[in-house]
């Protein structure tokens, strides 16, 4: 399949051109338009640990219960996908490695990619962000989205990223959650909150805007219900 990212960087949409018999798995509700000969079905899970339990785990992690499966039966089938947030999209090619993706940033993947939901332990419990992350393995393209622009950082040693700005990172990196400043109170009063400290060698993908901070700002401006 061929994947093109259009309207970058602030209103990105993915155009996927599929060959006959190819299959694409996407987050439910992300399809914008498609060729009339592409068949659509739903599944609770793509990859390891399927069934009802897999679907319920996705809900706990902030994802949709169902995934959409698009199967193309003729050459040059087209499908357009767009994320929930206004922002950018990238394509990451899986080659048997593993990446960890924050809840809400997974958009779609090829059929050779496995998606699992993993608990990242207490090191992410107090981050103010997702306790659960998607663990993605296998072979093929993965389409990821961000809130705002998306960029990658090549880590070799140690690097610090605000927890709300993480889109994904390669599992070759280890991480721990900590305070941005010298004290926990000072970090929060300074508006920085908690950060993720990465160790090792690998890529981290970041987004320019923080969905949690944006939601808090918008929510404070709404009239009480």
Image (cartoon, helix red, strand yellow):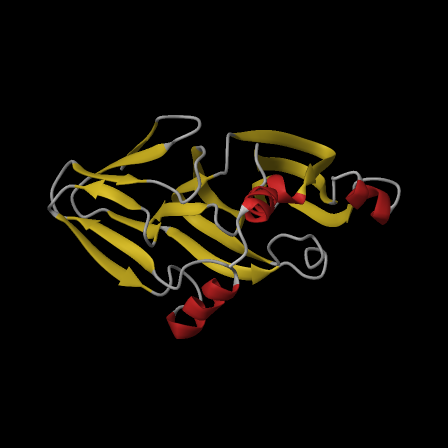
Q: Is residue 111 visible?
A: no
Residue at the (19%, 42%) spot, across then down = 34
Q: Position of residue 139 (x, y in %)?
A: 40, 46
Residue at the (11%, 46%) spot, across then down = 37
Query: Is 90 rendered above or below residue 24?
Result: above
Q: Is residue 70 visible?
A: yes
Q: Nearer the viewer, residue 69 or 190?
A: 190
Q: Nearer the viewer, residue 63 or 154?
A: 63
Q: Position of residue 122 (x, y in %)?
A: 71, 61
Q: Quadrant of residue 42?
A: bottom left
Q: Position of residue 39 (x, y in %)?
A: 16, 53
Q: Position of residue 132 (x, y in %)?
A: 57, 59
Give the total of numbered labels: 0
43 relative position to 187: left or right: left
Residue at the (37%, 46%) spot, across then down = 108
Outermost residue, bottom side: 52
Query: Is 57 rendered above or below residue 94?
Result: below
Q: Quadrant of residue 202?
A: top right
Query: Is 112 rendered above or below residue 155?
Result: below
């Amino acid at each position: 399949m061929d994947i093109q990212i259009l309207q970058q960087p602030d209103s990105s949409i993915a155009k996927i051109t599929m060959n006959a018999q190819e299959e694409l798995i996407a987050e439910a509700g992300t399809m914008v338009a498609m060729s009339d000969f592409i068949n659509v079905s739903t599944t609770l899970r793509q990859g390891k640990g399927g069934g009802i339990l897999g679907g319920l785990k996705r809900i706990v992690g902030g994802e949709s219960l169902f995934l959409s499966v698009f199967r193309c039966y003729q050459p040059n089938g087209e499908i357009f996908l767009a994320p929930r947030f206004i922002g950018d999209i990238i394509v990451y090619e899986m080659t048997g490695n593993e990446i960890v993706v924050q809840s809400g940033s997974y958009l779609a993947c090829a059929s050779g990619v496995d998606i699992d939901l993993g608990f990242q332990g207490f090191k992410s419990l107090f981050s103010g962000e997702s306790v659960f992350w998607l663990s993605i393995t296998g072979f093929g393209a993965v389409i990821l989205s961000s809130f705002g622009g998306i960029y990658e950082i090549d880590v070799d040693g140690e690097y610090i990223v605000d927890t709300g700005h993480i889109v994904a990172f390669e599992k070759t990196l280890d991480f721990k959650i900590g305070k941005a400043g010298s004290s926990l109170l000072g970090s929060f009063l300074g508006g920085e909150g908690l950060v993720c400290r990465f160790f090792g060698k690998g890529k981290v993908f970041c987004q320019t805007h923080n969905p949690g901070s944006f939601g808090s700002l918008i929510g404070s401006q709404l009239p009480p219900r």
